[in-house]
């Protein structure tokens, strides 16, 4: 008995000394166009060779989620879902205004969880959507004052801009400043620093490659003009319902784009030169973000933290770069819902593990909790507004042991529309082979419920023969039974698609 207590005490002491730190990266609007994603799931067949050495190196020692899907292809809803571990129909955040603690519940977030567990949590840049959507960066989540950079260059006049590197010394870009803050913060946990010895949760949120694509000019060298091609499908899917479309006002409103008077309508497109320039600028901004992440990771290593620090990386959703003639996110297409995600856990993923299983952004919270040795999270009950800590995703830890083991058989996303004053919610699922979407009428507070009897469109894309989603087969007689089955699965909801033995 005594021996046992001593052993338990010893284990506790060991755990306290070896508490794993967490370095938590986010990038904005970064679709999984990284070399490590090349393969059947790469978002577009038309792309230059990508220059992303740092994220590729991180992927090579991480669990790489090749098919991770966001809950909603918009910053705040996606980030809120990831950070609370709950889906939009629980957080009630579908826009850039509502704050989950006001409309959903007083849920514990990832950084807040680590703070409660004795970590120093520090955040910088864009983690929560800034402003009212997060009650100004959700103050309760952080131990240290939140950091935002000073804006010198990023304006609404230009959708993209390559700035000569020498002009950036006196007035650095926001992400450069965020990187500097990350280095400073990490140093404060090392020998002689203000928080020496405390376990840390450090969240570093980069703004690029979000619009405006502003980056140091030198990063264009990786994408010579002749490497940039037009997408091969600059048209909407055959048979696409209008409700699926977004007129990409976010891009058209930038000064340089507004001058082109593009309508944003279905089957119209931007001038070829503009499409090429935007693609080139997006890739350059993406590579620049990769380089900043590399600098932070290199400092983590220099400080001797890297073998005791969990590192996660995600981009908050995908992005359409002119495929379908579509731009930005704001849709339920594969390109908008598929996003990069990887998790490095020292000692467990050092040799790199790739999984092709369907994973979701709500899976990250329970994964980090387990990876840090802080227990497991309970599955949320049907109504969880009064439950502070629970999950609507699955810990990804089993995929480390068996990357192709039993797992969920669908990933769920959604996107709201407002059509002639009718509220609509597009619900979509990705299964191994298909993407299936329905656009029912939706009632907001207090019900937050779809009416499946009032549909404004259905979509079915067969990824085996149509990975670009160019043809909607929802009404194709050859797909009748598949569509019926997928419809049933979609309406049954995510709980019915959990891995075997889960959620019962
Ligand atoms: C929300 O929960 C936190 C604990 O995580 C508590 O400190 C705070 O007072 C709660 N806020 C409300 C409005 O209940
Ligand atoms: C858009 O163009 C594609 C390809 O030509 C066509 O199949 C589709 O029906 C068009 N959609 C609309 C709404 O015109
Ligand atoms: C390359 O493309 C950019 C726009 O993306 C343009 O400004 C520049 O003139 C082009 N350079 C050459 C050499 O064609
Ligand atoms: C991490 O590395 C340092 C020095 O390289 C070593 O002393 C320490 O034991 C390592 N920690 C773990 C958890 O492997």
Image: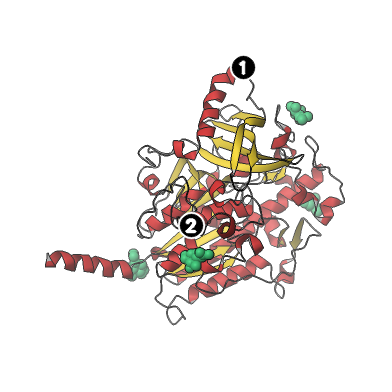
Q: Quadrant of residue 104?
A: bottom right
480 displayed left or right of 1: right
Residue 27 position, x and y percent, is 59, 57
Residue 7 position, x and y percent, is 19, 65
The image's mark for residue 312 is 2
Residue located at (59% from left, 17% from top):
478
Q: Name the one closer to the observer, 65 or 413.
A: 413
Q: Secondary structure at mark 1?
A: helix
Residue located at (54% from left, 33% from top):
491
The C terminus is located in which quarter? top left
In the depicted structure, whether residue 332 falls above or below residue 144: above
Q: Which quadrant contains ligand 2?
A: top right
The N terminus is located in which quarter? bottom left
Find disc 1 in the rendering and name its residue: 477
194 displayed left or right of 8: right
Residue 429 position, x and y percent, is 55, 36
Residue 138 position, x and y percent, is 57, 65
**Residue 322 seen in render:** no
């Amino acid at each position: 008995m005594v021996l046992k207590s001593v052993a338990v005490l010893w284990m506790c002491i060991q755990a306290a000394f070896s508490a794993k730190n967490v370095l938590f990266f986010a990038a904005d609007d970064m679709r999984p166009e990284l070399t490590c994603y090349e393969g059947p799931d790469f978002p577009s067949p038309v792309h230059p060779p990508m220059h992303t050495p740092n994220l590729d190196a991180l992927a090579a020692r991480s669990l790489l989620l090749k098919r991770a899907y966001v809950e909603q292809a918009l910053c705040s809803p996606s980030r809120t879902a990831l950070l609370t571990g709950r889906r939009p129909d629980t957080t009630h955040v579908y826009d850039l205004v509502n704050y989950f603690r006001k409309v959903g519940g007083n849920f514990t977030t990832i950084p807040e969880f680590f703070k409660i567990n004795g970590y120093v949590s520090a955040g910088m840049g864009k983690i929560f959507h800034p402003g009212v959507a997060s009650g100004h960066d959700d103050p309760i989540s952080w131990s240290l004052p939140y950091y935002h950079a000073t804006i010198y260059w990023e304006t609404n006049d230009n959708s993209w801009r390559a700035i000569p590197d020498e002009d950036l010394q006196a007035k650095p870009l926001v992400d450069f400043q965020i990187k500097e803050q990350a280095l400073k913060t990490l140093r404060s946990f090392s020998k002689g620093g203000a928080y020496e010895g405390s376990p840390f949760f450090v969240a570093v949120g980069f703004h690029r490659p979000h619009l405006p694509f502003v980056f140091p000019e030198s990063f264009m060298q990786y994408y010579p003009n002749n490497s940039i091609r037009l997408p091969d499908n600059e048209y909407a899917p055959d048979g696409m319902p209008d409700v699926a479309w977004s007129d990409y006002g976010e891009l058209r409103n930038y000064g340089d784009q507004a001058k082109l008077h593009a309508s944003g309508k279905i089957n119209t497109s931007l001038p070829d030169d503009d499409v090429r320039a935007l693609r080139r600028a997006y890739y350059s901004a993406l590579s620049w973000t990769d380089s900043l992440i590399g600098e932070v990771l290199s400092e983590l290593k220099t400080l001797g933290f890297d073998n005791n620090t969990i590192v996660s990386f995600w981009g908050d959703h995908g992005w359409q770069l002119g495929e379908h003639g579509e731009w930005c996110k704001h849709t339920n297409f594969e390109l908008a819902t598929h996003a990069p995600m990887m998790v490095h856990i020292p000692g467990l993923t050092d040799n790199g593990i790739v999984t092709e299983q369907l994973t979701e952004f709500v899976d990250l919270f329970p994964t980090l909790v387990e990876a840090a040795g802080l227990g497991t999270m309970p599955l949320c009950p049907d109504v969880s507004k009064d439950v502070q800590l629970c999950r609507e995703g699955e810990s990804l830890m089993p995929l480390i042991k068996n990357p192709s083991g039993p797992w969920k058989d669908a990933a769920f996303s959604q996107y709201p529309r407002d059509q002639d004053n009718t509220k609509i919610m597009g619900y979509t699922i990705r299964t191994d082979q298909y993407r299936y979407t329905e656009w029912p009428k939706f009632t907001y507070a207090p019900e937050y419920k779809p009416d499946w009897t009032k549909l404004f469109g259905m979509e079915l894309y067969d990824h085996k023969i149509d990975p670009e989603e160019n043809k909607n087969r929802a009404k194709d007689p050859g797909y009748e039974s598949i569509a019926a089955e997928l419809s049933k699965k979609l309406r049954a909801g995510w709980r019915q698609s959990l891995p075997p033995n889960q959620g019962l």
